Image: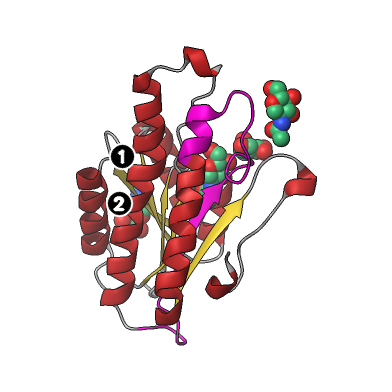
Amino acid sequence: MSLRPIFVVAGVGNGSGTRSFSEAGYSVALIARNVCALQELADELNGSGGDAHIFPIESYTAAAIHSAFDLIADHWASSPLTVALFNATSDVRGAFLDITSAQLKESVDTNIVASFAFAREAILAFKAQPTHDGKSGTLLFTGATASPRRNMTTSAFAIGKFGIRALAQSLAKEFGKENIHVAHVIIDGDKTEWISFAMASDDID
Ligand SMILES: *[C@@H]1O[C@H](CO)[C@@H](O)[C@H](O)[C@H]1NC(C)=O
Ligand SMILES: *[C@@H]1O[C@H](CO)[C@@H](O)[C@H](O)[C@H]1NC(C)=O
Ligand SMILES: *[C@@H]1O[C@H](CO)[C@@H](O)[C@H](O)[C@H]1NC(C)=O
Ligand SMILES: *[C@@H]1O[C@H](CO)[C@@H](O)[C@H](O)[C@H]1NC(C)=O
């Protein structure tokens, strides 16, 4: 079997984006909380010539994410991890006075604490492997309209999304010089606001 590069994604949704990575020849490591949906997607990708494996986690804690990356490294022991995408989110919305501290914690944990842990694992993996064409790896974060702008019901959600964007910018500055490409990509919403930060790491500001 030829050696495919690994694409690891946390938060796969309906899998539409992940399918593209599989079709492009990546081994696909699926990390998410919904085991049934994950298994279905992995079976589908495998069925169409892909190489997908699931790494379900109960919640996006640092420990669970660390274990998932260990299992991924064991599963594809000699393949390089070239792309890691943090695509998980907790979309807590509501009028400010209705948002509970538990909901705020859910947003902070799933958006900020989890993306921080995910980034740590991805960067450690990139640094531990040889470079490919001078590149060490690409770390992507999914953003939303709420990443650069707030709205009336987004107090908890936007805090989480702003946090991910802040993390992405900081990592781009710190690791761009080590040929680790870090990008934050806003994928939803108002077409005129489609801002893509998917450019050279040091261009992110
Ligand atoms: C990221 O999540 C969104 C929303 O759940 C989904 O539509 C998209 O396909 C996911 N991206 C990838 C690469 O799986
Ligand atoms: C997946 O979800 C996205 C939006 O999140 C939607 O645009 C797309 O049509 C969905 N694809 C499938 C196969 O359901
Ligand atoms: C897909 O196939 C690969 C090997 O070809 C295997 O490692 C993996 O477990 C399979 N995934 C599923 C969900 O069956
Ligand atoms: C802000 O929220 C309002 C009310 O929900 C909505 O109509 C509007 O489209 C939102 N604006 C943006 C930029 O998301």
Residue 118, how many percent across, how many down? 33, 53
Compared to 114, does 78 lie above or below?
Answer: below
Task: Give yes or no for residue 36 being in the magenta stretch.
Answer: no
**Amino acid type of the residue tagged 1 in the rendering:** Tyr
Q: Secondary structure at mark 2?
A: helix
| Quadrant assignment, res 64 | top left
Screen quadrant of the C terminus: bottom right
Residue 201 on image: x %, y %: 53, 72
Residue at horizontal 37 percent and vertical 29 percent from the top: 106
The magenta segment is: 131-160
Placement of 139 over or under 147, stated as above or below: below
Residue to which mark 1 is pinned? 60
What residue does disc 2 label? 117
Label 2 crowd (10 A; few <14 / some 14-19 / many >=20) = some
Q: Residue furthest right?
A: 192
Q: Nearer the viewer, residue 70 or 78?
A: 70
User: Going 43% across and 34% down the picture, which residue do you hit?
Assistant: 37
Q: Seen from this angle, which residue lies furthest front?
A: 97
Residue drawn at x 42%, y 46% is 42
Q: Crowdedness of circle 1 by 10 Å Cα count: few (<14), some, many (20+)?
A: many
- Ligand 1 within 8 Å of disc 1? The answer is no
At a point 27% along the width and 67% down the height, the residue shown is 124
Find out whether residue 138 is within the magenta segment. Answer: yes
- Mark on residue 172? none
Front position among marks 2 and 1: 2
Residue 87 visible (yes or no): no
Q: Quadrant of the N terminus?
A: bottom left
- Pick the front one: 122 or 116: 116
Circle 1 — which element?
A: loop
Q: CA distance from mark 2 to mark 1?
A: 9 Å
